[in-house]
Image (cartoon, rainbow, N blue to C red):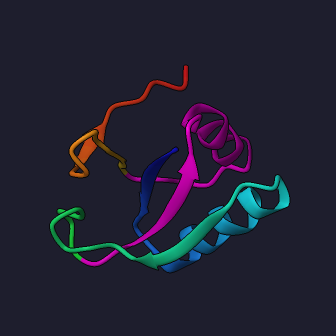
Amino acid sequence: MKFYYITFRSVTHAQRGERALQREGVRCILLRTPKWMEQRGCGYSLRLWTDQVYPVLKILQAGKVPLGKVYRQGADGQLEEWNFDLS
């Protein structure tokens, strides 16, 4: 199982995302985004335990929750930005 981090610009958006995912049974935790991950200043993120991130992103999209970037934990344990296309 991999870790994914989804960043949000505000705590309100992160909380909306957390509630939407928890309603669907997706395990996540809300936390402050490390500064190296968030280029636009302080932000918040959800840490996910999942192998399938597309359904998670679809839940957020359906709930109209604006999200920032997605990071995936690589095989070496390092986090890397993950590009996604929901269209």
In the image, is residue 74 above or below residue 29?
above
Is residue 36 left or right of 28 when viewed as pictured? left
Q: Which residues are magenta?
A: 42-68
Q: Residue furthest top?
A: 87
Per the image, is 47 magenta? yes
Which quadrant would the C terminus be assigned to in this image? top right
Per the image, is 9 magenta? no
| Residue at (56, 68) in percent of width and height | 13
Is residue 34 left or right of 47 when viewed as pictured? left
| Residue at (54, 26) in percent of width and height | 86
| Residue at (62, 74) in percent of width and height | 15
How many numbered dots are placed on residues in this image? Answer: 0
In the image, is residue 60 above or below residue 23?
above
Using the image as rendered, state which of residue 27 and residue 65 is in the foreground: 27
- Pinpoint residue 78: horizontal percent, then vertical percent: 21, 51
Using the image as rendered, state which of residue 2 and residue 40 is in the foreground: 2
- Pinpoint residue 2: horizontal percent, then vertical percent: 46, 45
Is residue 87 left or right of 22 when viewed as pictured? left
Using the image as rendered, state which of residue 86 and residue 31 is in the foreground: 31
Q: Quadrant of residue 7?
A: bottom left
- Pinpoint residue 42: horizontal percent, then vertical percent: 28, 78
- Pinpoint residue 54: horizontal percent, then vertical percent: 58, 32
Is residue 42 left or right of 7 when viewed as pictured? left
